[in-house]
Amino acid sequence: QSVLTQPPSVSGAPGQRVTISCTGGSSNIGAGYDVYWYQQLPGAAPKLLIYGSTNRPSGVPDRFSGSKSGTSASLAIAGLQAEDEADYYCQSYDSRLSGYVVFGGGTKLTVL
Amino acid sequence: EVQVVESGGGLVKSGGSLTLSCAASGFTFSNAWMSWVRQAPGKGLEWVGRIKSKIDGGTTDYAVPVKGRFTISRDDSKNTLYLQMNSLKSEDTAVYYCTRTARYFFDYWGQGTLVTVSS
C-alpha cells in the first residue's frame, strides 16, 4: 500500500485530455511539500516529467501540466498522443518516513 | 550530456551479497546528491537510499526495508556511486536505478541493472 494513492489505470482517445490524481495526507502533500511526476515508457527507465508540482523540465511538451491542492496533486495530459502510453508515478516528501521519499503506486495510461 | 550508467547486476542466492556501481558523467559528480531507486518485476518504484555530497555532509539515508543490509557509498575521484547489498532476500529482486538527486527528487536516471535473488 503506497503512501501516495494513484488510480491503477486511466485511458483516453487521441486528442483528448486526461488527468491522473495523486492523493496523499497531512504529512506529505498536505504539509505543503512539492509533488513530482515521472513518465516510464514501456521497457524504459523513468523520466522526470514535472518538478516542484507545476514545472516542466526542458524538453517536456507543454501538453503536460501539474497542479496541487490540499492533500492531492494532478497530472494533466492534453492532446493525447499514442506515444504518451506509459506508466506515470507521482512522488513527494513525507516528514514521517526515513529518508522522506514516497512514491505513488503508478498509473497505467492507455491511449485508445 | 548528463549520463549515469549502472552495472553489476546479476543472479545471487538468498543471503548472498552483491555490489552495484554507477558511473556518472556530464555533471560535477562531487557536488551531486545521488540515490538508488528500485522496481520489482511488474511493480512500482521504491526508493532505496541516498547519499549527500561531501560538501553537504556526505551522509546516507535508507528506506526501512534495506536499512542495515544495504550501504551506499561514493568515490568522487572516480565519479562513481556504489550500492553494497548484503543478506539479500527474494524481495530484493528488482531493477536498480541510479539517479542524480536534486535534493528530494530524481532528475536523471540510468537505464537500470537487474538483480535477481534466488531462494
Image (tube, coloured by chain):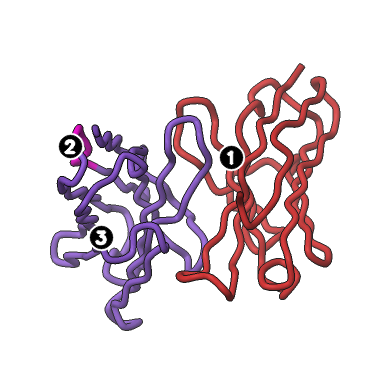
Chain colours: A red, B purple
Q: Which residue is mark 3?
A: B69
Q: Which residue is mark 2?
A: B13
| Residue found at x 33% / y 47% | B3
Mark 1: few/some/many CA within 10 Å (<14, 14-19, 20+): many
The mark nearer the N terminus, 2 or 3, is 2
Q: In the image shown, does A88 or B18 lie closer to the viewer?
A: B18
* Residue at mark 2 shares a chain with residue at mark 3: yes
* Chain letter of the residue carrying label 2: B
SS under mark 2: strand
Residue type beneath disc 3: Arg
Whether the residues at callouts 1 and 2 have beta carbons within 8 Å, the answer is no
Q: In the image shown, does B58 or B31 lie closer to the viewer?
A: B58
Q: Main secondary structure of the magenta part?
A: strand
Q: Measured along the vertical axis of the image, is residue B59 above or below residue A7?
A: below
Instruction: Tell me: A79 left or right of B87.
Output: right
* Residue at mark 1 shares a chain with residue at mark 2: no
Distance of mark 1 from mark 2, alpha carbons? 32 Å
Mark 3: few/some/many CA within 10 Å (<14, 14-19, 20+): few
SS under mark 1: strand
Instruction: Tell me: B57 left or right of A108.
Output: left
Whether the residues at callouts 3 and 1 have beta carbons within 8 Å, the answer is no
x then y, percent, for residue B81? 24, 58
Q: Which residue is mark 1?
A: A39
| Residue found at x 58% / y 40% | A39
The disc placed on residue B32 is none
Distance of mark 3 from mark 1, alpha carbons? 30 Å
Residue type beneath disc 1: Gln
Q: Which residues are magenta?
A: B7-12
Residue type beneath disc 2: Lys
